[in-house]
Amino acid sequence: MGEAYYLRILQTYTYGIYSHARRQHSIYMWNETIGEKGVNNVLSAEHDHHMNQGTGAKYLKLWFDGCPGQMQNWTAIMYHLYITDPYFGGRMYERLDECLPIKGHSYMENDRAFGHIIQESKGFKTISDYFEWMNIAKNASNANPYRVIEFKQEMHFDWKAFLSQFYVKGRDTIDAFHAKLRGAVWRSYGCSEEMVKQPDGSVKSELVYHPGEVWLRYSHNDKEAWTKVDLRRDCKKKDQYIYSRNAQGFMCNVSTGDLPEPTKKVSEKHKDFPLYKDGLQPITALKYRDLDKSKLHLAEEKQQYYTDLSYNGTIVDSADEDEPDLDEDNDK
């Protein structure tokens, strides 16, 4: 096995979103000089998808995997509150249900797309950069070509900082119990179906409007009682009420017919919260040293990209780093 096998590589990241309504895969690609693959990055990709690939639907059902660094965390919950909350200027949907697959059965449509991309890549002896990965992804499916997006640095936003203006990370439930995110497989935003007691004493299912609150279930059983958590920083005002549609199709209070009125008018300012402010991210000196060696296996026109990369630290030749100083040993 050659030396190149052990050399550090420049990581290429991908994030896939499949729209069942459009029957369309969106594949976001970038490398580690542009950004990481954390919750801010994947939420930025999701936000771009909502803004550019939305169908106009008022109800969204979202299936996701359980990676805690990406979607299984309070920042992701705050983002989905934000896009269903009429109070802060970012509302896109009236209702959003977010579900984890049953354990052991987490194969989703995105996995099929990634499998096609890997299969397509096997025809290439070398892949020099993420631009080549993008071309591979574009050609991975002839029947339904994937929408491949170069995920540029200006598209990454600091959602943690932005959302912390409006919401808190975790809080006791409305019933004063500590809410546990771990184990919750169903998260509901905007409005949810709940069994509501009627004036005649009977109970029936109604849609209850709950902006700023995430309702959790720990199974896929639609009869399970919701665990309710209000994450608004100012959560004194409770806006739960049963809703129906008025003649114009908007949510309104069943008893009064009134539309929900914002308590605050805050325009969307996420573009004031760029995630990366200082340009491309430097790599480590050790990685630069390895890339300087492995680039020799690439075509000459592809090598300059790696030569121009910025790095932190001092380049130390591997021979100097690994071999002992014999003169120093003899002095001892």
Image (tube, grey):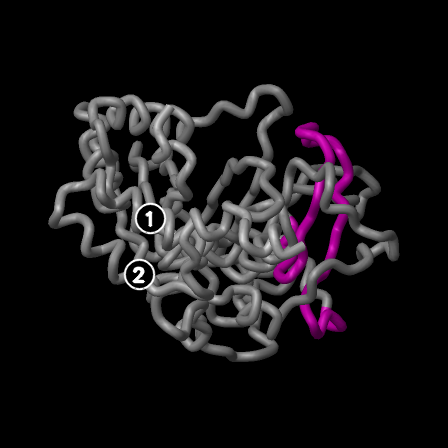
Viewer-closest of 213 and 75: 75
Quadrant assignment, res 196: top right
Viewer-closest of 234 and 28: 28
Question: Residue at 73% across / 70% down in the picture?
Answer: 235
Mark 1 secondary-structure assignment:
helix
Foreground: disc 1 or disc 2: 1
Q: Earlier in the sequence, mark 1 or mark 2?
A: 1
Looking at the rendered structure, which numbered label has been put on residue 118?
A: none
- The dominant secondary structure in magenta is loop
Q: Residues within 10 Å of mark 1 (few under 14, many from 20)?
A: many
Q: Split into 4 quadrants, where in the image is the N terminus?
A: top left
Q: Which residues are drawn in magenta? A: 208-237
Question: Residue at 36% across / 56% down in the picture?
Answer: 48
Q: Are marks 1 and 2 in contact (CB under 8 Å)?
A: yes
The residue wearing badge 1 is: 291
321 relative position to 2: left or right: right
Q: Amino acid at mark 1?
A: Leu
From the viewer's perspective, is residue 238 above or below residue 194?
A: below
The residue wearing badge 2 is: 309
From the viewer's perspective, is residue 124 above or below residue 63?
A: above
